[in-house]
């Protein structure tokens, strides 16, 4: 896994952590659940898109 992929995954992680923290603070458990469910697919998209461009 290249450095670009790692950097983008770190950014994605930070974005999701911020979104989850905001949702928790607002009492939006439905949004927390959706974010948790969506995160693996978003991470896989980052990996596949960036690895496709690196090939």
Image: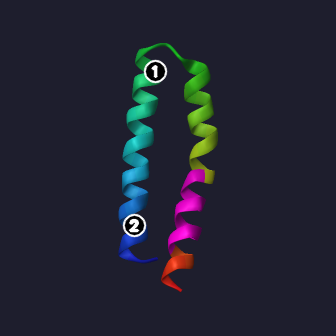
Please, what secondary structure does the residue beneath circle 1 have?
A: helix
**Number of numbered discs on residues:** 2
Rate crowding at label 1 as few (under 14), some (14 to 19) or many (20 or more) other CA atoms within 10 Å: some
Nearest to N terminus: mark 2 or mark 1: 2
Q: Is residue 18 left or right of residue 27?
A: left
Residue located at (56% from left, 36% from top) = 35
How many angstroms separate mark 2 from mark 1 (CA)?
27 Å
Rate crowding at label 2 as few (under 14), some (14 to 19) or many (20 or more) other CA atoms within 10 Å: few
Look at mark 2 in the image and give the residue it sits on: 6
Residue 24, which numbered label?
1
Residue located at (41% from left, 77% from top) = 2
Q: Is residue 37 magenta?
A: no
Q: Residue furthest top?
A: 27
**Can you give x and y, in whole percent of width and height, for residue 4 in the image?**
38, 71
**Can you give x and y, in whole percent of width and height, for residue 38 in the image?**
61, 43
Q: Residue furthest front?
A: 53
**Can you give x and y, in whole percent of width and height, for residue 19 in the image?**
43, 32
The stretch of residues the image draws in magenta is 42-50
Residue located at (64% from left, 40% from top) = 37
Is there CB contact under 8 Å for labels 2 and 1? Answer: no
Q: Is residue 49 magenta?
A: yes
Whether 37 is drawn above or below 20: the answer is below
Whether 11 is drawn above or below 51: the answer is above
Residue 8, which numbered label?
none
């Amino acid at each position: 896994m290249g450095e670009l992929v790692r950097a983008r995954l770190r950014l994605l992680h930070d974005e999701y952590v911020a979104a989850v923290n905001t949702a928790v603070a607002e009492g939006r458990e439905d949004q927390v659940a959706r974010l948790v469910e969506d995160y693996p697919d978003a991470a896989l998209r980052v990996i596949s898109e960036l690895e496709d461009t690196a090939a």
